[in-house]
Amino acid sequence: MEHLSLASPAGIVLSLDAVLILLLALACLGSKLFDRYLTYYGLQSMLLAVAAGTAAYVEREPALWVLAGLTLVLKGVAIPEAARRLLVRRLQLKRDVVTIVGPSTSLILGAILAGFAYLVIGPQHLAQGLISASIIPISTAVILIGALAMVLRRHMVAQLLGWLIMENGVFLGGITLTASFPFIVEAGIFFDVVACFLIMLAMTTGLAESLVALSDRGRREPT
């Protein structure tokens, strides 16, 4: 995959796909609504599935088609919908109000990190005309933006989504650099196991906060 020409049809699809993934990461960084967090992450994961499908078509690797399907079903649909039902509808988590800076400042910082990634790992440092020269800086920028979201957000759910955005950035870079299915599976399993743990932790935290709020309300009510 790293030897794929940037001007080829598959190269154009992957480049456009990567740009949209980066824009969705920035959109998530500039929002405060949990429902939008999940929507942006779901769309980003669907685009990642398209990238995996393009890699499968180029490499003619059936295992990559399986990976693309799993990414679409699990990360693009199942995880966002399950999280939306539990966190947004049941626990009524609407808006992330615990942030260090506002959305505008977050977007500016995200754009600065994206520019930094392009300068440090830009086309001038990679082989010209190859897909890696376009994708690797973008995947690095997505990783940095996900890390920034984890730093700027204080709520556990928002930090979790920042982690998942980082995972998508790693996945995008892995698809570009190697067509080795075992490598991608090993990296993906590692991040998904950690992500599942964080999801369980976020669910437990949300339930605990709800129970504490109900307990405090009961104490304040007259008997």
Image: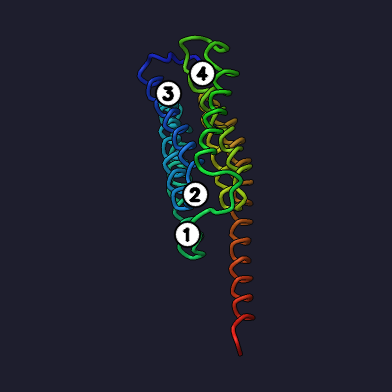
Image disc number at residue 21: none
Amino acid carrying mark 2 in the image: Lys
Give the CA distance from mark 2 to mark 4: 33 Å
Q: Which of pointers 1 and 3 lies earlier in the amino acid sequence?
A: 3
Q: Which of pointers 4 and 3 lies earlier in the amino acid sequence?
A: 3
Query: Pointers 3 and 2 in contact (CB under 8 A)?
Result: no
Looking at the picture, how far across and down is residue 143, in whole percent?
Answer: 57, 33
Q: Which of pointers 1 and 2 lies earlier in the amino acid sequence?
A: 2
Give the CA distance from mark 1 to mark 2: 13 Å
Q: Nearer the viewer, mark 2 or mark 4?
A: 2
Mark 1 lies on a secondary structure that is: helix
Looking at the picture, how far across and down is residue 81, in whole percent?
Answer: 44, 54
Amino acid carrying mark 4 in the image: Ser
Give the CA distance from mark 3 to mark 2: 28 Å
Residue lying at 49% horizontally and 9% vertically, measured from the top left: 128
Give the CA distance from mark 4 to mark 1: 38 Å
Amino acid carrying mark 3 in the image: Ser
On screen, 210 above or below 167? below
Image disc number at residue 88: 1
Residue lying at 63% horizontally and 66% vertically, measured from the top left: 208
Q: Which of pointers 4 and 1 lies earlier in the amino acid sequence?
A: 1
Q: Nearer the viewer, mark 3 or mark 2?
A: 2
On screen, 117 above or below 26? above
Which residue in the structure is indicated by mark 2?
Answer: 32
> For mark 1, does the 10 Å Cα neighbourhood hold few (<14), some (14 to 19), or many (20 or more) residues?
some
Residue lying at 57% horizontally and 28% vertically, measured from the top left: 113
Q: Which part of the image, by quadrant, shows the C terminus?
A: bottom right
Which residue in the structure is indicated by mark 3?
Answer: 15
